[in-house]
Amino acid sequence: MNDMGKNMTGYIHSIESFGTVDGPGVRFVVFFQGCPMRCKYCHNPDTWAAAGGSKRTVGELLEEYGRNQAFYRGGGLTATGGEPLMQLAFLTELFSEAKKRGIHTCLDTSGILYSDRKKEEFHRLFAVTDLVLLDVKHSSGEGHLKLTSKEQGPVLAFAKALENAAVPVIVRHVAVPGITDGEDELRELGRLIGRWTNLKGLEVLAYHTMGVSKYRELGLSYPLEGIDDMRPEKAKEAREKVLEGIRLVRGKK
């Protein structure tokens, strides 16, 4: 590892040494600090502030990975957040150095910060990214704006750029009772993502309220107060509706 790569610093919220839900296998999960979105169901409001967290170098993170490297066979390193794309240069350097060590790289992102003006910078990231977990918040632009406070356009442009670069994508969608679990919305989501030639998987996650305590600690009001956790079986039913939409757009029964 060259000194420049080793010494590049980023703001990191936390580390999970043995993650099992953020990509294949057992993974070293790096939670990046900072996020421009304000999703109503966000369970990590403590990651929003860009200046929070602790400063870590690429070298430090990979040294920490190396301490438990034997456990990550079949797994690898996942960058999540927050929103890792807020620190695009640091993220790209981390993945670049990881690939030099033969580490599988996975990016969990909303894609909200994609811009054609930074196309070359994103291409450098894509070249060292093995898998993207793309969080698709809503099937419609109006619903996306209402739910996240941000326009959907950059997300769709990011998805197209990933498709053009042939980066494998697993779509993640949080099913929130009364907001993102309607049959029409779920089928339309399927129609949207079913056109992507690089789509490799679909995860529909059940809404939960585990983050409510963090809002209270931060003195924030919880936007979805009164909405109960979704039962796992309901999330499975929601996934089937999305798959129906995928089959419809692909002409399969």
Image (cartoon, rainbow, N blue to C red):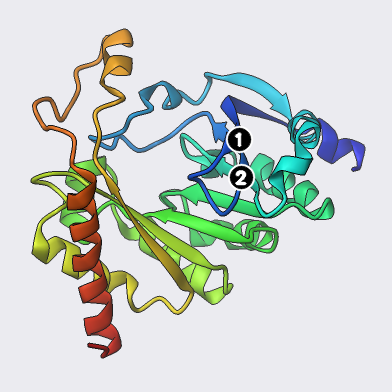
* Closest to the observer, 97 or 154: 97
Question: Tag 1's secondary structure?
Answer: strand
Contact? badges 1 and 2 (CB < 8 Å): yes
Res. 116 visible in picture: yes
* Secondary element at tag 2: loop
Q: Which residue is mark 1?
A: 18
Q: Earlier in the sequence, mark 1 or mark 2?
A: 1
The answer to whether 64 is drawn above or below residue 207 in the figure is: above
> What residue is shown at x 73% (from left), y 45% (from top)?
93
Residue at mark 1 to residue at mark 2: CA–CA distance: 6 Å
User: Residue 54's spot in the image, x, y percent?
Assistant: 62, 18
Residue in the image at 79% along x and 47% along y: 97
Image check: 59 left or right of 95? right
Q: Is residue 158 visible?
A: no
Residue 30 in picture, x, y percent from top left: 60, 35
Classify mark 1: residues with Cα within 10 Å, few (<14), some (14-19) or many (20+).
Answer: some
Please state which amino acid type lies under the numbered disc 2: Val
Q: Quadrant of residue 213?
A: top left
Residue at the disc numbered 2? 26
What is the three-letter code of the residue carrying label 1? Phe
Where is residue 75 drawn, in percent x and y? Answer: 65, 51
Residue 127 falls in which quadrant of the image?
bottom right
Q: Quadrant of the N terminus?
A: top right
